[in-house]
Amino acid sequence: MNKALRQAVIAGNWKMNKTRPEAKALIEELKPMVANAKVGVVICVPFTNLETALEATKGSNIKVGAENCHWAKSGAFTGEISAPMLAEMGVEYVVLGHSERRQYFGETDVTVNRRVRAALDAGLKPIICVGETLEHREANITEMVVGVQTKAALEGVTAEELKNIIIAYEPVWAIGTGKTATAEQANEVCKYVRDVVAKLYSKEAADGLTIQYGGSMNAKNAAELVAQPDVDGGLIGGASLKAPDFTEIVRAACQG
Ligand code: 13P
């Protein structure tokens, strides 16, 4: 079974939520609930919560990620945070190319790739988001869009570096809308991404790549999604803000 060749990872993407005291309370609640998880557990939190999260998760199985980073190491980029700054703190993961960044902050395939490069160079593990809009899906160009995003993001990335990358398939129409892709739709596109990676690198590299689904994944629908052969966990928005819901998704992935 190919699923045994890779690790399932459940990652929370808190987006722009939680003050520091709220973050600490959520992590303290979550820690014992996911302590025995056989899958990777990651929380990607706002920059202001990183130190709190790193402190609160010390000695636990919960890994910490940021939600973005700039491509330059340092310099005159007011308001930005660089990959070496995150790495120095002890941050392990970074979400890159999230559709909200693409939609509201002018992120393009080119800038996503530059950020991926910077993250890898700093020793961070990128969680790269790809996904089609409803217009793309209705025009039957989902595979083309997701294929282009995947290839562009991985431009210049070696097979060795690919081992530190997670790809998250997040259909834009399913994010925060309560509309989840069906398990079949999610698997179909995750499998397509794996095929693209197999062509770019090798079957072995593709078999080892963690590919998550994201978009309105919750305690109720997680089990069916993560049981799919090409879905290796999830990137969770809203449901990651409640410890019992997030835990239920982690539990589902342990069985998936
Ligand atoms: P929701 O789970 O809130 O739909 O968000 C998904 C997402 O964008 C995770 O990155």
Image: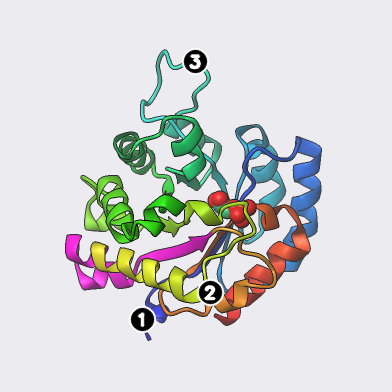
Q: Which residue is mark 1?
A: 2
Question: Of the residues under marks 3 and 1, which one precedes in the sequence?
Answer: 1
Some atom of ligand 1 lies within 8 Å of the CB belonging to the residue at label 1: no
Residue at x-position 78% and y-position 54%: 28
| Residue 138 x %, y % | 40, 58
Residue 224, quarter of the rendered image:
bottom right
- The answer for how far apart the CA atoms under marks 2 and 1 are is 14 Å
The secondary structure type at the circle numbered 2 is helix
Which one is closest to the eye, mark 2 or mark 3? 2
Where is the C terminus found, in terms of image quarters?
bottom right
| Residue 165 x %, y % | 38, 55
Image check: 120 left or right of 217?
left
Q: Which residue is mark 2?
A: 226
- Amino acid carrying label 1: it is Asn
Image check: 67 left or right of 128?
right
- Amino acid carrying label 3: it is Thr
